[in-house]
Amino acid sequence: MFSLAGKKALVIGIANEESIAFGCARAFRDQGAELAVTYQNEKAEPHVRPAAEKLASALILPLDVRDDGQYEAVFDRIRQAWGHIDICLHAVAFCPKQDLHAPVVDCSRDGFLTAMDISAYSFIRMVKGAAPLMRAGGTCMTISYVGAGKVVEHYNIMGPVKAALESATRYMAASSARRGIRVHALSPGPLKTRAASGISHFEDLMKEAADRAPIHQLVTSEDVAAFAAFLASRQAAHITGGIHYIDGGYHIVG
Ligand code: NAD
């Protein structure tokens, strides 16, 4: 139905094979795209490198999104290797534990700024870095959560952070469209990953998602990945700026 053959994709946010980013990278590769993958730091590299090699990633590069120099180096390397890029996937989030577990009103300024920087601004930075390499257009995607628009117990400050991410998605979609660049947020239901394990009572969240979602089943990272691959394809050329729920319909009742 659709192919990503010949397309070049940058994927940030692989921690291990459970990561949403890993599932998306695999789907891009399976549809024919060539991959550039990043790891957060030296500690992450031994986990990310084997996963990236499994996907035959052409480039495996360091990137802590707080470091503008590293971001520039990633896009420089892509420019040298490929000359352009077609697909960028951002699947990165972080909040210091103490702030993540506190009611929003008790979030510290440092915690707020750190969570915003790593989880939201870094997507803006990604789109900015990718744009000059997307001369023939392209697709940028991030991963949000239903807690952006509704109060989800225990999601705390990540709700406002994801709300900022979603709003930035819409503004960037509007301003990038004339260059043929499409910008999306995917909003999956809960998936057991390392980042998710930092959220208190995550098991309850999963149970509630399965109980209340009209489809009454949890989503898988393959579900998210298949949708991401479609959005990256030529067939999705007239779709931009959306918050795409892949959650068994939970967002309409949750
Ligand atoms: P994950 O732990 O596998 O991925 C999170 C990634 O963020 C890791 O690879 C980590 O290295 C990276 N990261 C954190 N700080 C970074 C930094 N400073 N620089 C570079 N990378 C950094 O977990 P995941 O669930 O796959 O998370 C991916 C995205 O999906 C996140 O934005 C998360 O909020 C979102 N999301 C997850 C769920 C879920 O239930 N798992 C649901 C909705 C949205």
Image: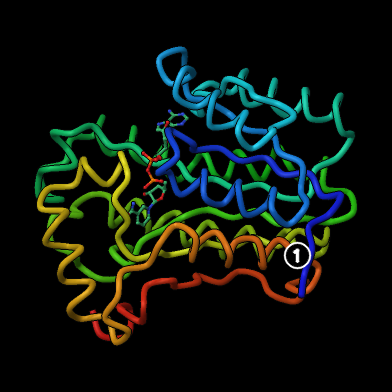
Question: In the rendering, at what x and y percent does residue 238 appear?
Answer: 75, 76
Question: In the rendering, at what x and y percent does residue 207 appear?
Answer: 15, 67
Question: In the rendering, at what x and y percent does residue 40 appear?
Answer: 48, 24
Dot 1 falls on a residue whose secondary structure is loop
Residue type at numbered disc 1: Ser
Name the foreground residue: 200 vs 117.
200
Q: Quadrant of residue 203?
A: bottom left
The quadrant in which the C terminus is found is bottom left
Determine which residue is flagged by label 1: 233
Name the foreground residue: 62 vs 155.
62
Residue lying at 58% horizontally and 29% vertically, measured from the top left? 38
Q: Is residue 101 above or below residue 137?
A: above
Q: Quadrant of residue 211?
A: bottom left
Judged left or right of residue 168, residue 3 is right
Residue lying at 78% horizontally and 52% vertically, measured from the top left? 32
The quadrant in which the N terminus is found is bottom right
Residue lying at 29% horizontally and 87% vertically, measured from the top left? 214
Judged left or right of residue 210, residue 32 is right
Check the image and name the residue furthest to the front: 54
10 Å crowding of disc 1: few (<14), some (14-19), many (20+): many
Residue lying at 45% horizontally and 39% vertically, measured from the top left? 17
